[in-house]
Image (cartoon, rainbow, N blue to C red):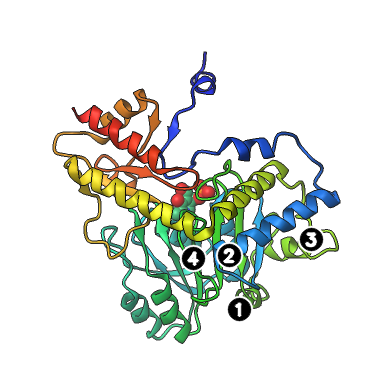
Amino acid sequence: MSDVATMRGRPSLLMTPGPTRVPARVLDAAHWVVHHRTADFSAALAETLTRLRPFFGASTADVLPVHATGRAAMEGAIANFFAPGDTVVACCNGKFGEMWAGFAESYGLDVRRVSENWKESVDPSEVEQVLRGPDRVRAVLCCHSDTSTGVLNPIEDIARVARTHDALVMVDGISSVGGVPFRFDDWDLDFAVTSSQKCLMSSPGLAFAVVGARAWSAVARSPFPKNYLSFSAIRKTLAGEQPETPGTTPVSLVLQVLEALRMHAEEGMDSVFARHQAMADHAAARADALGFGRQCPGLQQRSPTLTALTPPEGVAPKWLRTRVREMGIEIAVGMGHFAGAGVRIGHMGDIRMADVERTMDAIEAALA
Ligand SMILES: Cc1ncc(COP(=O)(O)O)c(C=O)c1O
């Protein structure tokens, strides 16, 4: 029997920073396939996008479904808004900040990497230094909650600096939107992205991009080919009398996200955020008591959606992950610079305090 078949009988508790557990109610909502060109499905799609707005903090900007995981919407942002040779600043204090930089470089943009120390939060003054330089900077690319380090970057401060220099602000909210307050309007952002498999507690495969007016104006000067990832094409089909997306919509994923957002609404957005913060506080307190260190002790603010740790002396991350896996719980090890040194515990989406407790108990038992 394959591992996957075994897991069907007894699913692991997914305490990874994505994908996260999908509640039974969300799975049930997508029990059968519906046709995507029907009034009923269009209504469900429209409701999904409306329910996402408060989690992005976006009242009027376009919310676009992108039929792929989050990286596709990030790549789409580069392909839709820029031209080769454009100068952009990329905040690189983690794997996913670096991912923005890598995508932009691959399209021939002139990328100025700042805040490259993974152990520190982004320093807005480093961004400002480039913005004050001789070259016209088109945009600042940054990650809100970098899932590789557990940082929660100061987007509001970064955006304030970018705004005074007329640069677009483009934010990866893939492990924050839905679990952490995110304020597209108040922070005056231009582009943001999230995806289905994290705080939106659905299966992987669907991203959502928010595009503001200034970003739309940049589309006209972008010469890159845009087909599957054309944001204008997505906006056009959504604007029809019956909102649709181009091609075959991943209907099951839309229905899952809709149900997840209804659950978030029943719990209340502020309660969802408070639950995430409480789980982060609890995981950190238990980890301290067990002799763990913080993977990045100097961060100014930590993401409430994951806890990134260094195990006590002599405990290898992969060994710990295997022991915990044997107890039916999946945690993650460090990424990039922290591969071999860190463990990451995700607590987002449908994860509850009892799950955090069970995970920390399992870690304690493994160490014992
Ligand atoms: C912060 C962040 N950005 C981007 C990505 C990539 O997104 P996806 O895997 O949905 O393509 C991830 C995935 O883990 C992430 O955590």
| Ligand 1 within 8 Å of the CB at mark 4 | no
Whole-angstrom CA distance, mark 2 to mark 4, is 9 Å
Q: x, y (%) of residue 166?
A: 50, 84
Q: Secondary structure at mark 4?
A: loop
Q: Which mark is residue 214?
A: 1
Classify mark 3: residues with Cα within 10 Å, few (<14), some (14-19) or many (20+): some
Pointer 2 or 1: first along the chain: 2
Whole-angstrom CA distance, mark 1 to mark 4, is 19 Å
**Residue on which the image places disc 2:** 54
Pointer 3 or 2: first along the chain: 2
Front-most of residues 159 and 367: 367
Q: x, y (%) of residue 172?
A: 49, 61
Q: x, y (%) of residue 126?
A: 32, 75
Q: Secondary structure at mark 2?
A: helix
Residue drawn where x is 62% and y is 76% of the image: 218
Q: x, y (%) of residue 118?
A: 29, 58
**Picture quarter with the C terminus:** top left
